[in-house]
Image: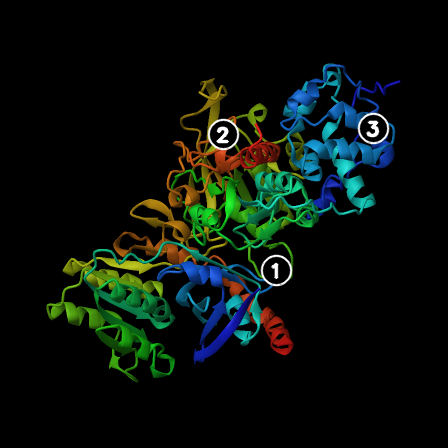
Amino acid sequence: MPNMTLTKTPMPVQDPKARGSNFLEVALGYTPEMAVEEAKRCLNCKNPKCVEGCPVNIRIPEFITRMAEGDFRGAYEIIAADNALPAVSGRVCPQETQCEQKCVRGIKGEPVAIGRLERFAADWYRENVHAMPQKPESNGKKVAVVGSGPAGLACAGELAKRGYQVTVFEALHAPGGVLVYGIPEFRLPKAIVAGEVEKLEAQGVEVMTNMVIGRVLSIDELMEQGYEAVFIGSGAGLPMFMGIPGEGLRGVYSANEYLTRANLMKAYREDSDTPVLRSKRVAVVGGGNVAMDAARCALRLGAEEVSIVYRRGEAELPARAEEIHHAKEEGIVFRLLTNPVRVLGDEEGRARAMECVRMELGEPDASGRRRPVAIPGSEFTLEADTVIMALGTSPNPLLRSTTPGLEANRRGCLVVDEETMMTTREKVYAGGDAVTGAATVILAMGAGKKAAREIHRKLSGTP
Amino acid sequence: MYEIVKKRELNPDVTLMEVAAPFVARKARAGQFIIFRVDERGERVPLTIAGYDREKGTVTIIFQKAGLSTRLLGELKEGDAILDFVGPLGKPTCTEGIKKVCVIGGGVGCAIAYPSAVAFREAGAEVTAIAGFRNKQIVILEEEFRAACGRTYIMTDDGSYGEKGLVTAKLKELLDAGETFDEVLAIGPIPMMRFVVETAKPYGVKTVVSLNPIMVDGTGMCGGCRVTVGGQVKFACVDGPDFDGSLVDFDELASRNRTYQDREREAAEGHACRLLAMGKEG
């Protein structure tokens, strides 16, 4: 008999007060008992809608059935067949707009907690099965992957499985891309990312850090060095600013910079040499996951008050539901329907406040969301010694500007053939945020995997 | 890991290192920079490339032991290794179309000005160098400049060596004497670069400056190095580091560079123990 409880089995979390001052993981994960209990909520639909909702089409009811039987290893293996990084996506996927949105249990009550179950399977496997994957027999062909974020890692893993000799080139000093510089430790422990990279290395993938492709080597030079195909998974790393007065003041950060200092450079630790401002009042502009991450980092770095300043309303917040919930629990103030006009500084050039205007929602815009319109005369001043701009990012122009024939669209995103993932250059493929603009980890992984299959098809001559 | 194959103290505060970094050496050009991270705890610090040997696969850096990270780097010896060394980053100095150039370096800025002077000469330009220092004790690269440039003027603030006065005094003297330049390249402290711009401007001479804002990744990702140039926001790491000096908002740059000054001061005191520990390890 299925478990007909209307709500998800709750996930244990760190106490909101305590976690406000540490960088340890917030969501603690299910126990085996909880996982089995939650797995039993799945009705094992004949025509599972959840699978359609998953960008990589994990066979969700199948893995959940195994889990309900207590076969955690079997559950993991089903997930791993379609998803290269389950411990990551179980933590950072926006399940509520993907698999869980389609779950029939969600019609009356809450959907099955697919994300939590996925995470449990991956964590259980990591903790209980220590076998490293074997290195497959080499097929003698070399492929280069540019960028070690979710797209690049997924592509590398998929190619390595098929015997390709893969070199991943990473510009920073540590592999993982946004998984290490962007997403904070308290949401995705870095040891998990490192573990995934180790698994790839065990399969023969070579990771070269400190290699900025486009500067140190061009795509053409990679081809000359014998790489038969190149996959570009360089992400969308270029931060946007609002273009309002005062953005050059000290204490105004892009979320990328703030998060990179906190996460990659570990500025929150006493023994890190990298500085980050220890602020009193922080305003984070934006409403996505990156904004939530920045706000929650600021809180943990000791800020007394942290606000999210977002020009639309609560319903329009693009962040994952769980992040918004956690942020509120931790005491982050949500200043919705509010838009910055300028940042005000002191005589030393330091940010001291932000002038904002209140907004109301008007007619829907091109994105289908109601357009926020400023209410005249509603300006007010919000005190803030640190302002973090989390307005989105666009692809870095370095590769397209140094690779002849590599075309991008007006937004700077690389143009690919949607069927083959090939760019406008023969044997050069791309996927992830470099193609879509800022999107999700799982979409990037899906794209990396698809490109790997297409590269294999091309290089092996299989139809 | 990137081995230090040669180390030389140029003056009590300024050190030269040749670092084995074959990939960087193969592509490096004057005006570009690298980012180093001395060890696992270290911050990412940009340094302009002072030279390179493509055959040996080495890159030369010259740095002033000013902050914590450069002092930690300075503690390393020949044969030691730097954990991370990434580059070449930024755009190279543009030598195109320049027939006569005046290259001006201030203090350790001379280390950056020198490879650009060489690049100009190799591109066929007639190069005049003006190198300014506080006093005789800290003069660096004099022979190198003299070998590379048609004329080299050494200036010291106190007159203890070369001619007494600021680099701008020499520039003005040359311009007043009817000297013409297609461009002035000024590299050094912000006040110096700003005064060079102001000195050259009335003569209709463009000054290019090389900026050194705070940076993390050096690839356009963090935006920490943003500078306002001609009213537009530019990232020094990918759009620069060289910019038309007359368009640069130096006040903003100087202010932003002070972001962590309190911490730097603390670090200078608090991290003394770390420096000592490193000294012992070596």
Query: In this view, which residue lies farthest toward the right?
Result: A1
Dot placed on the residue nearer the N-terminal end, 3 or 1:
3
- Pick whichever, A297 or A152, lies toward us: A152
Give the CA separation, mark 1 to mark 2: 35 Å
Q: Residue at x 56, y 65 (%)?
A: B38
Few, some or many residues within 10 Å of mark 2 (<14, 14–19, 20+):
many
Please give the chain letter of the residue carrying mark 3.
A
Q: Is residue B102 above or below residue A339?
A: below
Query: In this view, which residue lies farthest toward the left?
Result: B178
Q: Amino acid type of disc 2?
A: Arg
Please give the chain letter of the residue carrying mark 2.
A
Q: Are marks 3 and 1 in contact (CB under 8 Å)?
A: no
| Residue corresponding to mark 3 | A66
State the image quarter where residue B181 is shown: bottom left
| Residue corresponding to mark 1 | A272
Q: Nearer the viewer, mark 2 or mark 3?
A: 3
Q: Can you give x and y, in whole percent of width and height, for residue A173 in the image? A: 56, 55
- Pick whichever, A111 or A345, lies toward us: A111
Give the CA separation, mark 3 to mark 1: 44 Å
Q: Can you give x and y, in whole percent of width and height, for residue B12 in the image? A: 45, 80
Query: What number is the disc on residue A311?
Result: 2
State the image quarter where residue A291 is shown: top right
- SS under mark 3: helix
Few, some or many residues within 10 Å of mark 1 (<14, 14–19, 20+):
some
- SS under mark 2: loop
